[in-house]
Image (tube, helix red, strand yellow):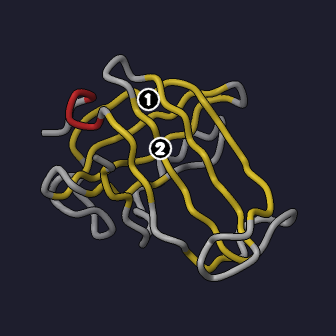
């Protein structure tokens, strides 16, 4: 079972090549800072180079994370749970999976939509010491 206490901390990806945004493209490092009370901050840092050493902008989002029931689907491994991310823009219905207490994978939905996205990202977030 996943709890907010297990998720508390800072979770970060490696430097990833992407073209995810109309405003930015190139390379990105993403991180979630999750508190035991469910508050979170998501940060996406954009870079011009493959070593993620030349900054090119930052996107941030903060809000609350609420965990729900266990998910069983083709796209979600055994330790996956519903995850509702609430922020100023609304609520998106997603999922979160915890692997060996060291890595998480996240699925985010479309804001204010009734469809829950359970297709976890291919990118893992490693817990920082």
Calculate the distance from the C-alpha at mark 1 to the C-alpha at mark 2.
11 Å
At x 12%, y 39%, the residue is 1
In which quadrant of the rendered view does residue 120 lie? bottom left
Residue hosting label 2: 32
Determine the residue located farthest toward the top in the rendered image.
37
Q: Nearer the viewer, residue 5 or 56?
A: 56
Image location of residue 25, percent across then percent down: 77, 73
Examine the rendered structure and indicate whether residue 74 appears above or below residue 6.
below
Q: In the structure shown, which secondary structural element does the residue marked by tag 2 occupy?
A: strand
Q: Which residue is painted at 28% across and 69% down in the image? A: 74
**Residue 44 spot, x, y in % from top left:** 63, 53
Q: For mark 1, give the secondary structure.
A: strand
Which residue in the rendered view is the most extreme toward the front? Answer: 53
User: Image point 72% across, 31% down: which residue?
Assistant: 89
Image position of 72 (left or right of 92): left
Q: Which of marks 1 and 2 is nearer the N terminus?
A: 2
Q: Which of 85 and 35 is in front in this view?
A: 35
Q: Are marks 1 and 2 in contact (CB under 8 Å)?
A: no
In the rendered picture of this protein, how many numbered marks are placed on residues? 2
Q: Which of 49 and 26 is in front in this view?
A: 49
Q: Mark 1 points at which residue?
A: 65
Label 1 neighbour load within 10 Å: few <14, some 14-19, many 20+: many
Query: In terms of depth relative to the viewer, which is nearer, 67 or 9?
Result: 9
Instruction: Point out residue 91 in the picture as x, y percentages from the top left corner.
Output: 59, 31
Residue at image coords 66%, 74%:
27
Crowding at label 2, few (<14), some or many (≥20) Cα neighbours within 10 Å? many
Report the residue that reaches farthest toward the right. 23
Q: Nearer the viewer, mark 1 or mark 2?
A: 2
- In this rendering, would 75 be left or right of 55? left
């Amino acid at each position: 079972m996943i709890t907010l206490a297990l998720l508390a901390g800072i979770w970060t990806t490696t430097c990833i090549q992407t073209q995810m945004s109309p405003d930015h493209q190139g390379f990105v490092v993403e991180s979630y800072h999750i508190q035991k009370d469910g508050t979170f901050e998501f940060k996406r840092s954009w870079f011009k180079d493959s070593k993620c050493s030349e900054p090119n902008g930052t996107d941030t989002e903060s809000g609350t994370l609420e965990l729900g029931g266990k998910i069983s689907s083709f796209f979600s491994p055994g330790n996956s749970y519903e995850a509702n991310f609430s922020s100023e823009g609304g609520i998106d219905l997603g999922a979160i999976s915890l692997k060996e207490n060291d890595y998480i994978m996240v699925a985010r939905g479309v804001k204010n939509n009734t469809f829950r996205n359970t297709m976890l990202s291919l990118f893992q977030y490693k817990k920082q010491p």
